[in-house]
Image (cartoon, rainbow, N blue to C red):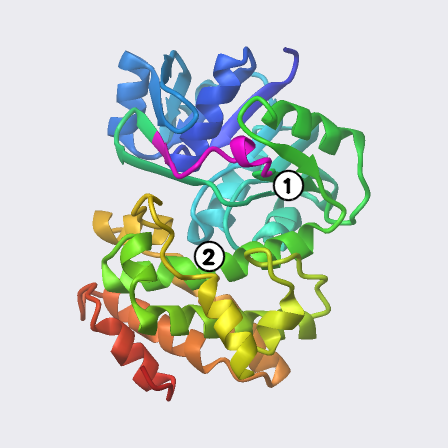
Amino acid sequence: MGDRIGIMGVGAVGSYLGAFLTREGHDVTLIDMWGQHVDTMKRDGLSVSGTQGEFNVQVRALHLVEAQQIKEPFDIGFLCVKSYDTEWAAHFFKRYISATGVVVSAQNCMNDQLVASIVGYQNEVGCVMSSISVALWEPGHVHRGGQPGSGRGHDVFRVGELHGKITDRVLKLVEMLSCIDGARTTSNIWGERWSKLSTNSSSNPVSSMMGLGSQGVANSAGARKLQVHICKESAQVGQALNYDIESVGGIKADVWSNADQGDVYEELEARFMPSPGAPDWKSSMAQDVTKGRLTEIEYMNGYIVDRGLELGIPTPVNTAIVEVLRDIDAGRIQPDPSNVERTLAMADLKA
């Protein structure tokens, strides 16, 4: 279909994007460091299962060291690596992007500024993926859990320029991603990013520290308390940074900021209550912990803490969350539901 597309980092998100875009007929090259995954894709293709249906597609996959085989630059590059790999991966990927090409940060966390500083501000576009759960538990097979976004009328992909204008390339990317799920343009990519940061920060580490899926977390009153206060602190910091924060879980940032008010707290806690029939899905960070991989805690809750320190805004719950996940990353403690009480105590909150 004309544009040459590269995907740097073919974990769950990169695999999901690559499978659908390839099936649609786009010229896609997948680049990753996990040798077994790349070898499986080369041999057996890339399989997709879950709520968007099942299929297998033959893909062009390269080991990182095989990137020297790339002869023609990419017009569009999707950066799908973990946040802690952003800097080196952006530098590596840059050499394979055409001078007029675009690098799309399809990542969690607030990485657009860093990516743009490396590949050029005129060459970077942000893409926020909202309410989508994908997992890569075995090489060559990506699975999507939860309800299909398009079935709920929900736009998973929100694509926008850092300067906020709706450009032709943003419109092109939205049309391209629509073969996967609902997609739309946004003139507020920073507000979308902070909203997603709040959502991730309230779900990922709590699931990870408990070693439970989403329904196990939802059944814990202490976990729900942590989640409300994480979002409260995140909203307060984001507003102080003058972000026009998009709604978090359908609730405006002003409401989250006032979570200490009794009636407001009850409304917000209800957002995290169990949903009958919903899948017990492990968050991406909980998947990393299960696999023995480093988490993105420093770039999620840690980012909120750092910005709060700069602004003089207290973030005791996020601070405690970061300390507990650092201990899990270092192997000093193991995921367990008792970590909720530990975190509440560290943040001086009652269970």
Residue 200 shows which numbered tag? 2
> Residue 234: x and y, percent?
55, 70
Element at label 2: helix
Residue beneath the point at 23% across and 58% down: 211
Which residue is more in the foreground, 72 or 15?
A: 15
Residue 47: in sight, yes or no?
yes
Q: Residues within 10 Å of mark 2 (few under 14, many from 20)?
A: many
Residue beneath the point at 32% across and 19% down: 41
Q: Mark 1 or mark 2, which is nearer the start of the sequence?
A: 1
Q: Residues within 10 Å of mark 1 (few under 14, many from 20)?
A: many
Image quadrant in which you'd find residue 140: top left
> Residue 82: x and y, percent?
43, 47
Q: Is residue 197 left or right of residue 65?
A: right
Above or below 311: residue 206: above
Residue beneath the point at 47% across and 24% down: 18
> Residue 15: x and y, percent?
41, 29
> Residue 20: x and y, percent?
48, 21
- Asked if residue 80 is among those painted magenta in the image, a careful observer would answer no
- Quarter of the image with the C terminus is bottom left
Name the residue type under label 2.
Asn
In 3D space, how far apart are the residues under numbered discs 2 and 1 (Cα atoms)? 16 Å
Which residue is more in the foreground, 293 or 47?
A: 47
Name the residue type under label 1.
Arg
Element at label 1: strand
Q: Is residue 73 left or right of residue 64?
A: right
Residue 158 shows which numbered tag? 1
Residue 142 shows which numbered tag? none
Above or below 54: residue 136: below
| Boundaries of the magenta span | 143-154
